[in-house]
Amino acid sequence: MTETTDRHRAPRATGLLIHAAARYDLLVWLFTLGRERALRERILGFANLKPGETVLDVGCGTGSLAIAAKRHVGPTGTVCGIDASPEMLARASKKASKTGHEVIFRNGAAQALPFPDGQFDAVLNTLMLHHLQRKAREQCAREIRVLKPGGRALVVDFAAPAYQKKGLLAHFHRHGHVKPGEIIAILGEAGLTIVDSGAIGFRDLQFVRASVPG
């Protein structure tokens, strides 16, 4: 299910906006060497989702992680995905329909989430911050206001630029990166408590986990 925000109120997204949804999925397949499902499950393991929880996937792209999260929270849980690219959301909605999982997809900017304060148990932000400039990253971090007291955030991103490496993926795609220390800093400035951080265990991906004081 895909929803759109009011055009007159929805903020304009800043940073890199991806429209080639099918190409994006191909790049993910190349990056993971066909092991994207295993990587998603590894990421969701860090999120520690529980049945019945409400989850928001910020910058959900083509919806694969949001759909996987729905399987974790079960029929009593709710998963929303938000992305600024209509093309990515259209592909995400088709994926969800094929799998039979009900996920709510909405069009909007990560810097001004169209949700009230304290709505979600968990917020996921994966492979998205490197598309934004520092100011936009800070705005995105402040939008963690949508977490409930005691809620948790999981941020995953590249720790080093891929163009320093050689290989098939680097030939097709050069992505940015975000230093883990910067993620920790902007989450702390937004009022979250850092729980832990480290390597995902897959290429140069790093995670930061944080929580809202209860």
Image: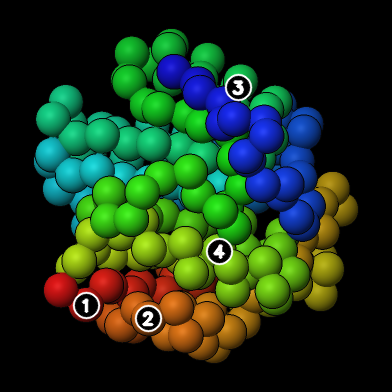
Q: Residues within 10 Å of mark 1 (few under 14, many from 20)?
A: few
Q: Name the mark nearer the viewer: 4 or 3.
A: 4
Q: Which residue is mark 2?
A: 191
Looking at the picture, the colour scheme in use is rainbow
Mark 2 near mark 1, Cβ–Cβ under 8 Å? yes
Q: Splitting the image into 4 quarters, where does residue 132 fall?
A: bottom right
Q: CA distance from mark 2 to mark 1?
A: 8 Å
Label 1, secondary structure: give it. Answer: loop
The tag on residue 213 is 1
Q: Which residue is mark 4?
A: 140
Q: CA distance from mark 4 to mark 3?
A: 24 Å
Q: CA distance from mark 3 to mark 1?
A: 36 Å
Q: Nearer the viewer, residue 84 or 159?
A: 84
Q: CA distance from mark 1 to mark 4?
A: 18 Å
Q: Splitting the image into 4 quarters, where does residue 108 fall?
A: top right
Q: Earlier in the sequence, mark 2 or mark 3?
A: 3
- The picture places residue 190, in percent across and down from the top left corner, at 44, 78
Q: Nearer the viewer, residue 8 or 114?
A: 8
Q: Residue at x 13, y 39 (%)?
A: 52
Q: Is residue 65 visible?
A: no
Q: CA distance from mark 4 to mark 2?
A: 13 Å
Q: Residues within 10 Å of mark 2 (few under 14, many from 20)?
A: some
Q: Residues within 10 Å of mark 3 (few under 14, many from 20)?
A: some
- The picture places residue 37, in percent across and down from the top left corner, at 43, 39
Specify the amino acid type for callout 4.
Cys
Specify the amino acid type for callout 2.
Gly
Q: Residue at x 70, y 76 (%)?
A: 134
Which residue extends farthest right? 171
